[in-house]
Image (spheres, coloured by chain):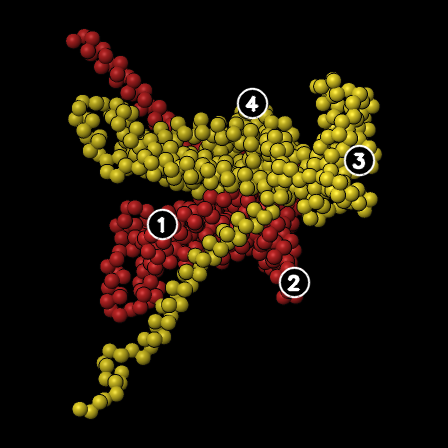
Amino acid sequence: MHTFESKNKSREMKEKAIKMALIVASTISILTTFGVLFSILFEAIAFFELRSFWYFLTGSVWSPGQVDSQFGAVPIFTGTIMITLIALVVAIPIGLGSAIFMSEYASHKTRDYLKPVLEVLAGIPTVVYGFFAALTVAPIVVKTAAWFGLEATFNSALASGVVMGIMIIPVISSLSDDVIKAVPDSQRKAALGLGMTQGETIKDIVLPSALPGIISACLLGFSKAIGETMIVVMAAGLRPNLSFNPLEDMTTVTVTIVNSLVGDFEFNSPETLVAFALGLALFIVTLGLNVLSLMMIRKFKEKYKVNTL
Amino acid sequence: MIKRKKNHKDNPFYDATLNARHRKSKRFKKFTLSSLVFSIAFLVFFLFDITSKGTPAFKQAYLKVEVTYSELSKKSYRKAIERKYSKIVSRAYLRTIPMMIEENPQLMGQTISTWVIADDQVDQYLKGHHYKLKNKDRALVDQMKADGNVELRFNTIFFTNGDSKSPEFAGLNSAIIGSILTMIITMLIAFPIGVMTAIYLEEFAEDNKFTQIIEVNINNLAAIPSILFGLLGLAVFINLFGLPRSAPVVGGLTLALMTLPIIIVSSRAALRAVPDSIRQAAYGLGLTKIEVTRDHVLPLAFPGILTGSIIGLAQAMGETAPLIIIGMIAYIPDAPSSVMDAATVMPAQLFTWAGMPERMYVEKTAAGIMVLLSILVALNSLAIYLRKKFEVKW
């Protein structure tokens, strides 16, 4: 009796230890998020102690490394938004179109072949896209622009934007595809039964039902495009440029972060610390977009009671 | 019987716009198809473009010249070959001659006709690319070619050498080893933590606030741009913990945190796919929760967990941005021997080459991309194979 009890006790201890280890492991993911947030936040605060917070958000002169260096990030923000918008203009119609074809028109067999092809696009490393954008797409953009009598630079926003758009096609198509498939079949049958054509059924019935999920997919693509680094580092410009002409060179938040950190400045100089201020802005925006995207998809799930998404 | 012409006015359901509506429907279908075709066409064009740029790099021009191994050439490596060849033979190769004499003293005093690596401009000229050669040197190369003293051989240097300032002498070797070291660190950290988190969330956790916070958090972690992990690595691992810059250990830690959500999500899916009847049967036999999980649920879920981890590994392998931030783009000619040495990884090496002015680096970058993509394809195929092989239909 006694031995049995003691064995049981040691076993209990062991079980408790294992459970504790599991809990500790799960907290690491939380620690990471806070680690990212705080490591960026503290250095960003150090930057804002040196330079004005308001000028960073609203100023339009960016002149690091000069005697009276100024850090107005507006031209960097607009550059980021321009390139991201170009990416979305490419990715949303193509991604959504592919998703509609795969979920509504393609047979199961074709679907099984097509889906991996799109996933290959997601698996290509971004440095490879960057190389492709800089060496293949950028010259094409310059030549095409010249053909129309326009002048484009070799690091135009258009080249990096288009390639970035292609990169986020699978982000948008994969989630949209799942959402469209989750729309109950009864809706399609009812619409077809009332004499709608297949195109009308999709456009007027299925897509509006799937809209929250589709918006969610687009927000996710948006967030991914804003945070994308390699394509813009390799193919976009370095010069902060407050312009809305996609044929000009522009820089983005991520490019500026990389350039501030690989430069020769001291770590505590505002030239380096500004990377963390930009990182903080990036963190807040991408996290906000992600939370918004999760909220939209939850709305969709609750409406149609799907749990597979 | 009067034959009446069929008139759609007799049909009360006739819709005059019907044909137009059908055409519109067909147009819509064509639009969706064309967007899919565009994606596939892009992929084909992309692969074709990279392959056509990269394939020439797997060949390297060699020249047959007389190499003199003497005291003089040991002191001044340029004297090892005839003066007229000095512009067309690889400078980086000549620099290795004193070392070769040191290693093989019996070479001393001999003049041997050897195949040596050609300068990058000669290589580009022979491949028909843009080149910068003086007419005199070009004529010499043409002459040597006519004599059969020029050859394009398989480029072993590309796989055996590290980075070099001379493009013809640059290879992927040190980057491949750097990648392997970094990936080992990444998986050593991300795999156990990821699987443990998944086990906790799927098998042990009750549905309370703590669990919900973890779940929301994992979702958010997956959405954080990779470059911000680089900032974390710089601020925490390098500045706070004092780990060496550019080292695989820092890169591995940073990438591990990025890979974590992928492993957690796929492991959870694999654990969830194990039917409850297995657990209930095990409980029924008197096993404890830990025994049930360890001996029955986990082995059944393991192929799925492995598949997800390999996919996570493939993704970490192609990641560049955070590694640039922590300085893994340094010039690394020799392969790192430990995880604390300065190193570079394959994608970072490609990034460095892509920014070089010499035309030959473009070729090498594209060839490096082909190597990297082949490794990623191999990893993903392995994942698919494992999934297919061990897939259990309950």
In front: label 1 or label 2 = 1
Q: Nearer the viewer, residue A5 or B246?
A: B246
In front: label 4 or label 3 = 3
Q: Amino acid at mark 2?
A: Ala
* SS type, badge 1: helix
**Residue pointed to by mark 4:** B338
User: Could you tell me how far apart the alpha carbons at marks 1 and 4 are, in whole angstroms?
Assistant: 44 Å
**Which shade of the palette goes to chain B?**
yellow
Q: Are marks 3 and 2 on the same chain?
A: no
- The mark nearer the N terminus, 1 or 2, is 1
In the picture as drawn, the residue positioned furthest to the bottom comes out as B2
User: Could you tell me which chain the residue with mark 1 belongs to?
Assistant: A
Q: Is residue A175 above or below residue A186?
A: above
Q: Nearer the viewer, residue B318 or A34?
A: B318
Q: Amino acid at mark 4?
A: Ser
| Residue found 49% across the figure and 30% down from its top | B183
Estimate the x, y position of residue B59 in percent, counting from the top left.
Answer: 63, 40
Q: Amino acid at mark 1?
A: Asp
**Residue pointed to by mark 2:** A146
**Which shade of the palette goes to chain A?**
red
User: Could you tell me how far apart the alpha carbons at marks 1 and 3 are, in whole angstroms?
Assistant: 58 Å
Circles 1 and 3, Cβ within 8 Å, touching? The answer is: no
Q: Which mark is residue B86?
A: 3
Circles 1 and 2, Cβ within 8 Å, touching? The answer is: no
Q: Nearer the viewer, residue B247 or B224?
A: B247
